[in-house]
Amino acid sequence: MITASQQLEAYDEELKRETCLEVGIYTHDAIADTRQQPQLSAEEMLAVTTATVSRLIADDKFVVAVGGEHAITTGVVQAYRQALSEPFTVVQIDAHGDMRFEYEGSHHNHACVMRRVLEMGLPTLPVGIRAICREEAELIAKQQIPVIWDRDIARDAELCCFRQHNFQEPPTSITSPGETLSNTLQASGIRGSKSESLLLVATRTITATPVCCKFC
């Protein structure tokens, strides 16, 4: 992704500016790289991720975490949970619920990442979900998680708009200090211009963006 990004045009035809060149982007060295450290456990990987993101937050940086395993989202969100005094909403753009208590014997499997986020006491907004298990369905009903389903977006793209969603619990969850957008790139109900519309109407503050690839 980093290599491919060098082939993208920097000019934004809507903003009429080269924002990324004006603001500046720093590419941090890879952290918790299991290719270099295959013995690294999931717990160690997340601890390193949290510690690194915490240092970047302290340095007043806007973090975009790019990774191939979206369990890293837990580490990124944990760092912001520790740094910010008020809760924030985690917007999850995904095809799957990822709310299992554990999967394949691990609490840190990618299928459990949003369950860990919920356990941090943070409200979530899953968007584009098309597949869940019974356990996740029961959790969604019990906690009244406001899922925007794949099938609904296919019928009405306006459901992607954040301003269509009622963020009432807790009242400070969005306006202060912001949103964390967690995006796993897979076959969800949001494609092409629909995903751009979702981001464009995000009029509130976005705190950080973990972008994790899992094509399926």
Image (cartoon, rainbow, N blue to C red):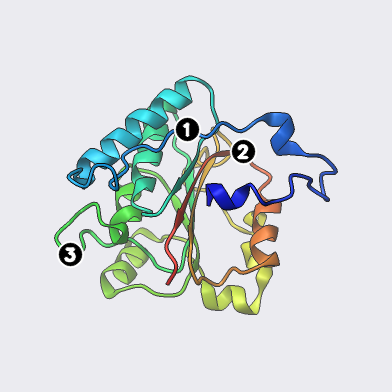
Residue 133 location, quadrant: bottom left
Q: Is residue 101 left or right of residue 21?
A: left
Q: Nearer the viewer, mark 3 or mark 1?
A: 1
Q: Nearer the viewer, mark 3 or mark 2?
A: 3
Which percent across, then down, holds residue 68? 40, 54
Q: What residue type is disc 1 on?
A: His
Q: Mark 3 or mark 2: name the one nearer the start of the chain.
A: 3
Which percent across, then down, holds residue 103? 21, 63
Residue at 37% across / 29% down in the picture?
52
| On screen, residue 22 above or below 46 | above
Q: Nearer the viewer, residue 137 or 132?
A: 132
Q: Is residue 192 left or right of residue 136?
A: right
Q: Quadrant of the C terminus?
A: bottom left
The residue furthest left is 105
| On screen, residue 190 above or below 112 | below
Which percent across, then down, holds residue 135? 26, 69
Q: What residue type is disc 3 on?
A: Glu
The residue furthest top is 59
Any mark on residue 104, and which? 3
Q: Residues within 10 Å of mark 1 (few under 14, many from 20)?
A: few
Q: Mark 1 or mark 2: name the one nearer the start of the chain.
A: 1
Any mark on residue 205, and which? 2
Q: Nearer the viewer, mark 1 or mark 2?
A: 1
Asked if the residue under mark 2 is in contact with the one under mark 1, i.e. CB atoms within 8 Å, the reply is no
Any mark on residue 109, and which? none
Q: Residues within 10 Å of mark 2 (few under 14, many from 20)?
A: few
Q: Nearer the viewer, residue 57 or 2?
A: 2
Q: State how far apart marks 3 and 2 are (Cα).
A: 36 Å
Residue at 66% across / 67% down in the picture?
192
* Residue at the disc numbered 1: 28
